[in-house]
Image (cartoon, grey):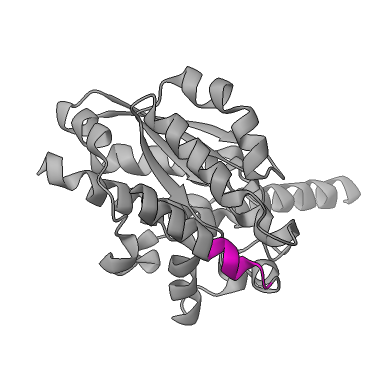
Amino acid sequence: MRLAEGLRRLLAGAMLLAAAAQPAAAWNTDECEVPDDLLRLDAPLPRTAQRLAAGGTLTIVAIGSSSTFGAGASDPKMAYPSRLRRMLAAEVPGAQIRVLNRGVNGEMVADMLARWDRDVVALAPDLVVWQVGANAALRATDLGDYETRLREGIARTRAIGADLVLMDPQYAPKVLARPIHRKVLAATDRVARETGVGLFRRFEIMHHWVTGGVLTFPVLLDPDQVHLNDRGYACVAAALTDAIVQGARPLTD
């Protein structure tokens, strides 16, 4: 009897683990819909458009810190870069999509620039998605040379002919608790506008979801109140997919 009871408990535990693994694939990202004005990058993606129109290989490098690496996700496949690859491939079936995740936990902009040649230039990307500002908002006491370093990364990306999209910080309780986050957002927006690169407004998009009442912080975020969870990464990837497709549309239509 004890053996049978133990076996039943083992089987029940296995069933619970299997059930816990299912929702990541079952979520309907229709709940993550975003108004077109929030998805607009405000800059074209000409090289991305050419690659997609030609049905060739589009190589994307996702560089950033922990929310690029995938902290809070149950598996690397659930982080936004892996999901972006799958979603873009579904949107543009004729193209081969490569998304290389070069996120490193805890990094600031200066840390990313220190590895730019190895983790961006050497990979010959067509599009770079650069997630910035979250750690500055969480840890910095002033912006320092934040804007200067953003401009350096933009110049180095343009030098290899790649498109670039900046991704600003996440809308999350620990970010909101730091008043400097407003300066980080304003500086990121200013640099994007003045240099003419695309800006994926993750902060505003997540604000739209949360204030809309459908996707709350517990739904989108890890219990640490700063990193996304599997569902949050799925929603960000869905919105970014739409933004990239729209940004490439002028040349692909």
Residue that appears at 45% across and 69% down: 204
| Residue 54 belongs to magenta span | no
Q: In this view, does 162 lie above or below 149?
A: above
Determine which quarter of the picture holds residue 33. Answer: bottom left
Residue that appears at 75% across and 62% down: 141
The image shows residue 54 at horizontal and vertical percentages of: 16, 26
The image shows residue 197 at horizontal and vertical percentages of: 36, 47
The image shows residue 226 at horizontal and vertical percentages of: 67, 62
The residue range painted magenta reads 179-185
Left or right: where does residue 55 sit relative to residue 173? Answer: left
Residue that appears at 62% across and 56% down: 134
Q: Quadrant of the C terminus?
A: top left
Q: Is residue 198 above or below residue 49?
A: below
Q: Is residue 214 above or below residue 243?
A: below
Viewer-side residue, 164 vs 159: 159
Left or right: where does residue 51 sit relative to residue 136? Answer: left
Determine which quarter of the picture holds residue 169. Answer: bottom right
Left or right: where does residue 221 sit relative to residue 196? Answer: right
Viewer-side residue, 180 vs 202: 180
- Most common secondary structure along the magenta stretch: helix
Residue that appears at 53% across and 33% down: 101
Does residue 205 appear in the picture of this structure?
yes
Viewer-side residue, 165 vs 97: 165
Left or right: where does residue 168 sit relative to residue 134? Answer: left
The image shows residue 222 at horizontal and vertical percentages of: 67, 61
Viewer-side residue, 227 vs 169: 169
Extreme residue in the top direction: 122
Extreme residue in the right direction: 2
Does residue 79 appear in the picture of this structure?
no
